[in-house]
Image (cartoon, helix red, strand yellow):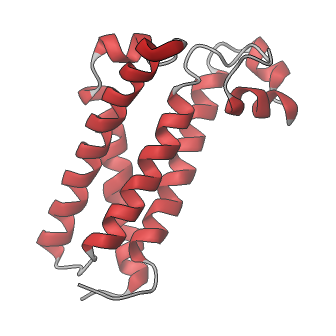
Amino acid sequence: MSHPAIQAAVAYAALTAAHEVGDYLIQADKDAAAKGHPGPAGAAACGRHVASYTATQAAALWAVNRYLRLGISPARAAAGLALSAATHYAADRCAGHWSSDSPDEPLLVRAAHKVGKGGWLNADHRAGAFIDQAWHKGWIFVAAAVIAGPGRRA
């Protein structure tokens, strides 16, 4: 059994590496193109992507936990992965919407404009992708803390 700080650091590294693999190598092109579309088709595409993304993160976390004998509890791993999945879905539903601050846009898009990111989002076509990735990595950090947090150890 490892110290929670070691578990958190290793979980963050594993989840972040798996994030890159899940977002860029595993994600299907059709889902990447459609995940921000409104309605059930966009939600389904985003759901498929988040399912494969989360499976990639789960496999990485399982492998590193087993190989390094970290003692991460399955319940804490599930809680952290669920947090990562839910926040990933919320951001990825914003795909293709970042430059608009219409009331019909997803909550994260409206929030980005409300806190003053609208000028950047409208001036630089890459800004939405940067905000998206910052959101993901920030929540991966929180998920790693949940995974390593206090509680019963395996």
Residue 29 in percent (x, y) is at 30, 13
Q: Quadrant of residue 49?
A: top left
Question: Which of the two residues, 48 or 22, is positioned nearer the viewer here?
Answer: 48
Q: Quadrant of residue 52?
A: top left
| Above or below, comparing residue 69 to residue 13 in the picture | below
Q: Which quadrant holds the C terminus?
A: bottom left
Residue at x-position 29% and y-position 49%: 57
Residue 70 in percent (x, y) is at 23, 79
Q: State left or right for residue 17 relative to residue 59.
A: right
Residue at x-position 16% and y-position 79%: 69
Q: State left or right for residue 141 relative to residue 13.
A: right
- The residue furthest left is 67
Total marks shown come to 0
Asked whether residue 116 is in view, the answer is no
Q: State left or right for residue 136 relative to residue 9.
A: right
Residue at x-position 20% and y-position 65%: 64
Question: Which of the two residues, 127 or 38, is positioned nearer the viewer here?
Answer: 38
| Above or below, comparing residue 130 to residue 79 in the picture | above
Residue at x-position 40% and y-position 63%: 79
| Above or below, comparing residue 150 to residue 95 in the picture | below
Residue 10 in percent (x, y) is at 33, 68
Residue 19 in percent (x, y) is at 36, 42
